[in-house]
Amino acid sequence: MTTNTSKEDILKELDETIKTDSNVTISTTISQSLEYLDVTIENNNGHLKISIYPKSASEPYILPYESDHPRHVHANIIYIALVRAARSCSNVEDFDMERLSTEMILLV
């Protein structure tokens, strides 16, 4: 969650939520950045910067050439990777880095 509320007010609200329902477990971490799913979200002087987070466990975009997938699936790999980068990156520099990374993966 992002907010302009003070840290004390946030912690107070979370504590009240935890007390309301014992089935709800909330762990709090207050930081300038976080990795969530496959993106990194950073607070850069009040502006949110979003970039793709390269998970070490994630597989590359490549399907084996011998797989039984239709040819259009193989052809769309780079398109989908670039669409994902365009949707996830909040600035052009991060998009370019992801584009270059994708191209290098596909060239190997």
Image (cartoon, rainbow, N blue to C red):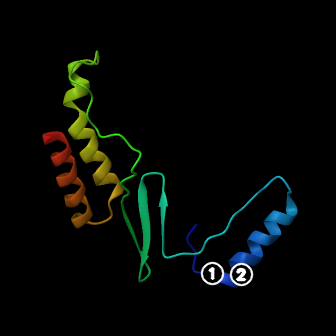
Left or right: 68 in relation to 12: left
Image point (32%, 47%), residue name: 84
The residue where tag 2 is placed is 9
Cβ atoms under marks 1 and 2 closer than 8 Å: yes
Is 75 above or below relative to 16?
above
Is 23 above or below relative to 50?
above
Q: CA distance from mark 1 to mark 2?
A: 6 Å
Name the residue nearer the viewer: 15 or 47: 15
Residue at the extreme top: 68
Image point (59%, 75%), residue name: 30
Image point (24%, 35%), residue name: 77
- The secondary structure type at the circle numbered 1 is loop
The residue where tag 1 is placed is 5
Local crowd size for mark 2, using a 10 Å CA cut-off: few (<14), some (14–19), many (≥20): few
Labels in figure, total: 2
- Could you say where residue 99 lies in the image, as x and y percent from the top left? 20, 52
**Residue 90 location, quadrant:** bottom left
- Could you say where residue 19 lies in the image, as x and y percent from the top left? 86, 65
- The secondary structure type at the circle numbered 2 is helix
